Image (cartoon, rainbow, N blue to C red):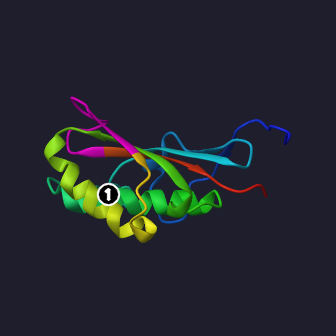
Amino acid sequence: MSEKSEPTRIPVPAGVAPAAQYAHVVMGTGRFVAVAGQIALDEHGELIGEGDPAAQARQVFENLRRCLAAAGADFGDVVKLTYFVTDMAHMPAIREARAAHIPDDRLPAASAIRVAGLVRPEFLMEIEAFAVVGEE
C-alpha cells in the first residue's frame, strides 16, 4: 500500500482564468485528481458564449483539459464527470463537447444536476472532473 499524502493545490494553468479556478485542482495521493468549478471563462476572465450552451460547453471542456494537464492527467484518466446545469436542455451541447475531448468514445460515469443558478446568471453550466492517474 502506498503512502498517502495531503492534498496539494495545483496552480492555475496557463490559459485558464483564475476565476474559473475558484476550487482549484486538488491532487491527493498522486493517483486521484479532482478538477472542480469549471465555468466558461477564457484566459482573460471573459465569459465565452453568453446564451450559447454549445460555446460554453466547449470552453468548459477546454478549461478542464488544461487543468487536468497541469495535474499530469488527461481525459483518458477521467472516471467521473459531474455537470451542474441551469437547464437540462443544455445536455446535448455538453455531450457534444465531451465527445470531442474524451478519447475513443470512452464514456466515464457522469451525472447531471439541475441547479437554479451558478455564480452569475449568464453561466449556463459548471463541470467538474475526477481522474485516476498512475503512481509517479
Q: Tag 1's secondary structure? A: loop
* Horizontal and vertical percent position of residue 24: 55, 44
Task: Kindly identify the residue that appears in the image at 42 percent across and 64 percent down.
Answer: 102
* Horizontal and vertical percent position of residue 116: 21, 29
Frontmost residue, 102 versus 49: 102
Q: Amino acid at mark 1?
A: Glu
Query: With 1 as the anchor, is 50 left or right in this view?
Result: left
Quarter that holds the N terminus: top right
Q: Residue furthest top?
A: 116
Q: Is residue 72 visible?
A: yes
Task: Kindly identify the residue that appears in the image at 32 percent across and 54 percent down.
Answer: 40
Indicate whether residue 122 is drawn in magenta: yes
Quarter that holds the C terminus: bottom right
Q: Mostly what secondary structure, the magenta segment?
A: loop
Q: Residues within 10 Å of mark 1 (few under 14, many from 20)?
A: few
Tell me the residue that label 1 is attached to. Answer: 46
Query: Start and end of the magenta stretch?
Result: 110-125
Query: With 102 as the anchor, is 77 left or right in this view?
Result: right
* Horizontal and vertical percent position of residue 65: 48, 62
